[in-house]
Amino acid sequence: MMIAAYGLSKFFPIRGAFRSTASLKAVDDVGLKIQNEQVVGLVGESGSGKSTVGRCLIRLLNPTDGEVLFDIPDSELAEYEKARAAAATERLDAIADRFSLLRRSSSELRPLRRLANIVFQDPYSSLNPRMRLADIISEPMLSTQFCSRAEAGIRARELLHEVGLPEFFEDRYPHELSGGQRQRVAIARAISTNPKLLILDEPTSALDVSVQAQILNLLRGLQQKYGISMLLITHNIAVVAYLAEYVYVMYAGKIMEWGDKRKVLRDPQHPYTKALMSSVPVIGETMTRTVLRGDPPNLVVPPLACRFHPRCPVAFEVCGWSADEVVEDLEYLLAGKYYGTFGDGVHVATEGDRTIVVQGTTDAQRISELVAREQEEIRSLKGIKAVDVTADATLIHLHEPIEPDMYPSTDGREVKCLLFRTGALVPAATS
Amino acid sequence: MSDALEIRDLHVRFHTRRGLYRALNGVNLRLARGEVLGIAGESGCGKTTMGLGVMSLLPRNASYPQGQVVFDNKDLVNLPREYSERVGDRFSPKQNERILRRVSKAMAPIRGRRISMVFQEPMTSLNPVLPIGFQVGESIYVHDPAQLARRVLARSKATPELTRELVSLLAATHGDETSVRKFAAEHDLAGIEEQALFVWSRGDIHISRKEKAIRALSGQPMNFVERWIIDTVVRARSIPWYLSRIPILSRIVRRVLMREGNRKARELLTSLGIHHAERVVRMFPHELSGGMRQRVVIAIALANNPEIVIMDEPTSAVDVTVQAQILELVKRIRTSVSASFIVISHDLAVLAEVCDRIAIMYAGRIVEVAPTDEILHKPLHPYTQMLISAIPTLEGKPVEGIQGDVPDMRAVPSGCAFHPRCPFAFEKCREVIPTDLPHGSDQLVACWLYEGK
């Protein structure tokens, strides 16, 4: 196994109020594996934490929590997973001490940097404008003591040739190059120390399609020639479809689904992946698409349980509806759509985490009816477990949410969605 | 039917310190009424320059040596073109700035009111220190203040009896626009129809609530000064000089009209699918997500019922799921609004979804124009063919890049600008610039391969 990450989390502290402990949960409990010589895609919207995962994997950022094992033999990995399942701390530590990237000091990490490298998104800012291309390309070779300065110069010329640039470019500066040429230089720099793992952080999103195609073909050629493992981080699903074998789909800091590329892209299982795939415009096809309502969530206060539930078209009882979410939709119904039935004077408010009080009406029958009628459209109403009446108000109780886990789906895929959990999910309604 | 806009042989050059940059080299394009036209091409091929050129928004170092932009039988670029013709090579940006000031004055009744633009990057085109409602309202206040005044006046004139009649009319005709318009004209209530129709077409509130809202449109109280201001603005169809120049008076005018602008902003945002618009109008751009910002910018562009809307990369700054929302929105407004659209994008797949016709640009020229289906399934120009084959698909079919780079526009290749990258180039391509050759009934292609076919 090239690299394996378990429970990887990265919380960024937020400055603000006095001694504030708020943090932005950019990556939360992410597991990811890349086999030797495998290309794995990581897709997601901007802000879903995919770049953060890439940086945490090679410790350009230090993760808050989790474990990253690098270049570990499969037998050891199997043992590690067994120990992890049994929570055997000693055995875990013994294996992790040898393979963990997170337990290395920065000086121990330096030789390992030869083996893993990264290509950044924007080739206009990732190349030092004051260095010649030859110096840019030899810099990682020198800083990791991969070879001597003289050898590095020769190798830089070879690498320029390798990525399809003429050798006389070695004396040029980045500003003389076009975007595609710069990205070629960035790739040459990344492969200069013969790495086993390459992290590609949006390698083509700053480029035109015609140039993007060249870069994709270059990457594919290098991968086949040297057998480099790659993690391809991108928001462009078609790019993943072109290069990767496995795909991880990320949303709001969590992995939502992963599996074989063909299966995930052609027959997505998770509701988010389905919506994502239907959003991709395809030339010459008119499709019915699922347009997601709303925007990606605020990751400082992420939604309860499943992070996708507020936008999910098939969310149900236990997906994590909070009282606030239900109140907002109830208010809209009682004071808007069904204004004619309830009139003025209805007031909806939360009472604790799981209860809602509707002041001004005791007509539980009507409320239950309209909840039953609207809940296919307005999914948050599914979270309502029971409607009670007191002397002057109506009480609404909500279901307890269940945190989703990665559940195995058909053909070796894993999906983080309660729809794929086996066993009864919804406790029988008590009213 | 006549065209909404016609661009004839438009040339644009930028005079820079490092030489003459030939951004546009003879663009010919017609935009039919009610049509959605897409412009595609690599970056640096002049898509945005063309959009800005139509609006005369190019910076002072841009000259128009040749060409016309004909809108409503008027040439929008005749002033700067005459200047460029007069001075030839002795072009001076400083003098051109003076010309541009005159152009701006001449364009004032057109820009924003009859031709409007959605700029790239909504974060930079919105003002970060002003609330959303103010920015949407301002675009109406600046371009068409009489519209706001009419709305206030209509509300103050409407009696409870008249609004009750209006409600029953709406119920009887199921919100028919022409009959409501007629009703408003008969009772001298111009301005109330759009407010009533907006309330009526809302899907999210109960009918009795709608009725209440429409009945609340009557009898807006106004004091003497306000009444006088509103009357004057309605009669003059704009803000007369004495209302805009006299210090204290101008502030009152602004306050009265901007209050109405905010109200209209709320209506516009709601109709573009923003929930809780009354909360959103008080927010600042940084509080909104990318998709919401894009909706706000589109609302500003649509605020004055323009005839042409130019959208420059409306979805490049947003994610696919938000892009899908915006595309659905554009598809919806193109049926509900009587405007023509020019959509500029580097993503052919986006254009394929919303456009009737697509024009492909390369090195400052249109190399191919055709209806969407034709261009995607039977592309003629080699550049179009290669551009389409470079797009990766979900099936992972092999992609081919186009060798070489976009040419340096300071030294455009002779003949067809694409010949250095074209696998089919022959002698004539290197020497003679290809003309637009018609192909079939509605396809134009600028390539010598199709000469005599």
Image (cartoon, rainbow, N blue to C red):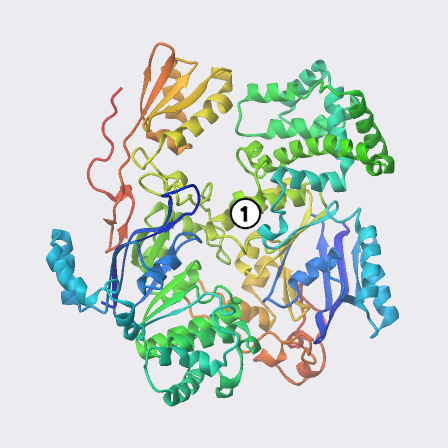
Q: Determine the image quadrant of residue B383.
A: bottom right
Q: Is residue B154 above or below residue A402?
A: above
Q: Is residue B220 left or right of residue A384?
A: right
Query: Relative to the observer, which residue lies in front, B312 or A394?
Result: A394
Amino acid under disc 1: Ile
Q: Is residue A130 left or right of residue A418?
A: right
Give the residue number, with chain letter if any, for mark 1.
Answer: B326
Q: Determine the image quadrant of residue B169.
A: top right
Query: Relative to the observer, which residue lies in front, B126 or B45?
Result: B126
Q: Is residue A362 visible?
A: yes
**Chain of the residue under the numbered disc 1 shown in the image:** B
Residue B63 in picture, x, y percent from top left: 78, 67
Residue A134 in picture, x, y percent from top left: 46, 83
Query: Relative to the observer, which residue lies in front, A93 or B64?
Result: A93
Q: Residue furthest top?
A: A391
Q: Is residue A15 above or below residue B274?
A: below
Q: Secondary structure at mark 1?
A: helix
Q: Residues within 10 Å of mark 1 (few under 14, many from 20)?
A: many
Q: Is residue B193 left or right of residue B108?
A: left
Residue A162 in picture, x, y percent from top left: 41, 83
Q: Residue furthest right?
A: B86
Q: Is residue B326 above or below residue B382?
A: above
Residue B357 in picture, x, y percent from top left: 63, 57
Q: Determine the image quadrant of residue B143.
A: top right
Q: Is residue B75 visible?
A: no
Query: Relative to the observer, which residue lies in front, B444 or A21?
Result: A21
Q: Please report the residue visible at 43 percent of the width from the left and 50 percent of the height from the top.
A: A278
